[in-house]
Image (tube, rainbow, N blue to C red):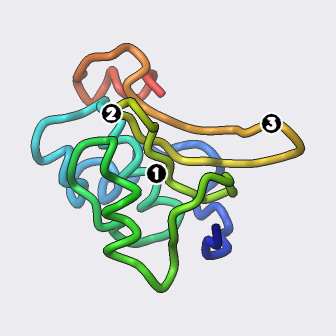
Amino acid sequence: MRYVGITFRGGTNPNFNNLEAWVTKNPYAQAGLYGQCTWFAWGRFYELYGYDPGFSGDGGSCVKALVVAHPDKFERSSSPKAGAVFSAIGHNHVGIVIAVKDNTITVQEGNLDGITNTFQDVKKDW
């Protein structure tokens, strides 16, 4: 799979002070889905790339929607690369690949407690 190269704009951890990524532009925030994996993946993508990933469905469909929205930049693959969005096969879940080194894949994902939270609580639930 080929992905656009990225530099991690704003660091390797979420910046929850970036209200565009986490509140004002994030469609999952507007739906009140704070803490859900989709809310987290959308916000991290926006922070890392600086634009809307083009998905707003459930976690299992995010990669498909990303590829449809940005076919010039992304394609589906089973080989992870830094900066990739992953949708879990067989699970309704989505996250971001932060790094791949040897046999170690570092991901960031939300909804680790399995519930929708307040904005204050989600800052600790990733």
Q: Secondary structure at mark 3?
A: strand
Q: Say left or right for 10 vs 39.
A: right
Report the mark closest to the observer, 3 or 2: 2
Q: Say left or right for 25 vs 11.
A: left
Report the mark closest to the observer, 1 or 2: 2
Asked if labels 1 and 3 touch by Cβ distance under 8 angstroms, the answer is: no
Residue appearing at x 31%, y 29% in the figure: 35
Report the mark closest to the observer, 3 or 1: 3
Q: What percent of the width, then of the height, locates residue 106?
A: 69, 38
Residue appearing at x 41%, y 61% in the figure: 46
Q: What percent of the width, then of the height, locates residue 50?
A: 45, 71
The one nearer the camera, 15 or 30, is: 30
**If the image is split into quadrants, where does the N terminus sit?**
bottom right
Crowding near the residue tagged with mark 3, few <14, some 14–19, many ≥20 C-alpha atoms within 10 Å: few
Please tell me in which quadrant of the rendered image residue 34 appears: top left
- Disc nearer the start of the sequence (3/2): 2
- Disc nearer the start of the sequence (3/1): 1
The amino acid marked with disc number 1 is: Arg
Q: Secondary structure at mark 2?
A: loop
| Image height of 47 relative to 116, above or below | below
The amino acid marked with disc number 3 is: Thr
